Image (tube, grey):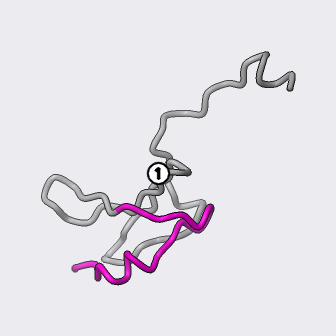
Amino acid sequence: MSLDHRLIELLVCPVCKGPLQLRRDAEQRPLDLACPADRLAFPIRDGIPVMLEHEAQSLDGPAPEPTEAASST
């Protein structure tokens, strides 16, 4: 199933309302919509973007532990 590019242009990140980037797999099929600002990727299932924050996957590894300097401010 193909994802309409007009739809992609209308969608924004549900967290920060920023623009999303379409990411594709090795076979050029739509994989997810990534928000570079929040470092989140929202999956595309059966050609439908799942724009729920709890369904998003982090583009980073686990969150780093806060340092003493950062936590004392």
Q: Amino acid at mark 1?
A: Pro
Q: Is residue 36 above or below residue 10?
A: above
Q: Is residue 45 left or right of residue 11?
A: left
Residue at image point 47% right, 65% down: 19
- Is residue 52 toward the left or the right of residue 59 in the image? right
Which of the 4 quarters of the picture holds residue 32?
A: bottom left
Q: Residue at x 36, y 71 (%)?
A: 45
Which element carries disc 1, helix, strand or loop? loop
Residue 64 screen position, x and y as percent: 61, 27
* Among the 4 quarters of the image, the one containing residue 29: bottom left
Give the overall secondary structure of the magenta segment: loop
In the image, residue 67 above or below residue 62: above
Q: Which residue is mark 1?
A: 36
Q: Quadrant of residue 21?
A: bottom left
Task: Judge left or right: residue 18 versus residue 73.
Answer: left
Q: Which residues are magenta?
A: 2-21
Magenta region includes residue 5: yes
- x, y percentage for residue 55? 53, 61
Question: Would residue 36 appear left or right of 67 to someone viewing this image?
Answer: left
Q: Residue at x 54, y 63 (%)?
A: 18
**Taking 47 as reference, is 23 above or below it?**
above
Viewer-nearest residue: 4 or 37:
37
